[in-house]
Image: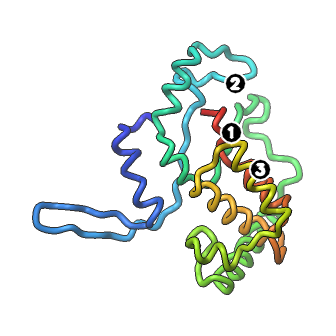
Amino acid sequence: PEFDRRVIESLRQPLEEQTVSIARVRASLVFPADFILVAAMNPCPCGNYGHPRKACMCSAHERIRYARKVSGPIIDRIDIFLSVGPVEYEKLGEKRAGVHASDTADVCSRVCRARVVQKARAGVLNSRMRLYDIEHTAPLDDDVREVLQDAARTYDLSARAYHKIIKLARTIADLDNARDIAAGHIMEALSYRQKSDET
């Protein structure tokens, strides 16, 4: 949240509609803006909140104010949140055990297959599905819907966040080569959402 708040807020339309509007005195133009947003922020102004060895120098009020620099509507438009801890010095430069080029090739193959399945099913990728597409191509069984509704109540999810979780769960199911969205797919999608107590 080091950018001016107005700059961050200007991402609302591009993230939602994949377009950006430029209005001038005599004309208004709309340009395509289809992109993947990858953003990072510290957990607090000093950057040490939650660090296993460094003490955070920020008050609770400062952490809350810092997190609120990114508004709820922007948070709502982000699909996946990951908390990344510090890397131990000893592990810097090490080759990761068990990670091979074949693993990367397998992931690439699964992603490509999932994209083909998504376009065949709805004509668009899951991330671009509209409400009608979600209801008709990503239906939930009653027990799966109950899991999501319980989470929606617990975390006070907006309608936008609710539908984003379904789209993400559908993608996870596609990567698993699963025909239907299972409760486990919903739970995994929920694990990537930022909870209200983290802001």
Query: x and y percent of residue 13 in the render?
Result: 40, 59
Earlier sequence position, callout 2 versus callout 3: 2
Q: For the residue marked with disc 2, what is the amino acid?
A: Gly
Q: For the residue marked with disc 1, what is the amino acid?
A: Ser
Residue at coordinates 42% horizontally, 54% vertically from top-left?
12
Residue pushed farthest left?
26
Query: x and y percent of residue 157 in the render?
Result: 63, 48
Earlier sequence position, callout 1 versus callout 2: 2
**Picture layout, residue 16 above or below residue 118:** above
Q: Which residue is mark 1?
A: 83
* Crowdedness near tag 3: few (<14), some (14–19) or many (≥20) residues, C-alpha within 10 Å: few
- Residue sitting nearer the eye, 72 or 114: 72
**Picture layout, residue 73 above or below residue 115:** above
Q: Tag 2, which secondary structure? A: loop
Q: Is residue 11 left or right of residue 144?
A: left
Residue at coordinates 66% horizontally, 74% vertically from top-left?
135
Residue at coordinates 74% horizontally, 28% vertically from top-left?
89
- Distance in Å between CA atoms under marks 1 and 3: 24 Å
* Crowdedness near tag 2: few (<14), some (14–19) or many (≥20) residues, C-alpha within 10 Å: few
Residue at coordinates 47% horizontally, 61% vertically from top-left?
16
Asked if marks 1 and 2 touch (Cβ < 8 Å), the reply is: yes
Q: For the residue marked with disc 3, what is the amino acid?
A: Asp
- Quadrant into which the C terminus falls: top right
Q: Which residue is mark 3?
A: 150
Q: Which residue is mark 2?
A: 50
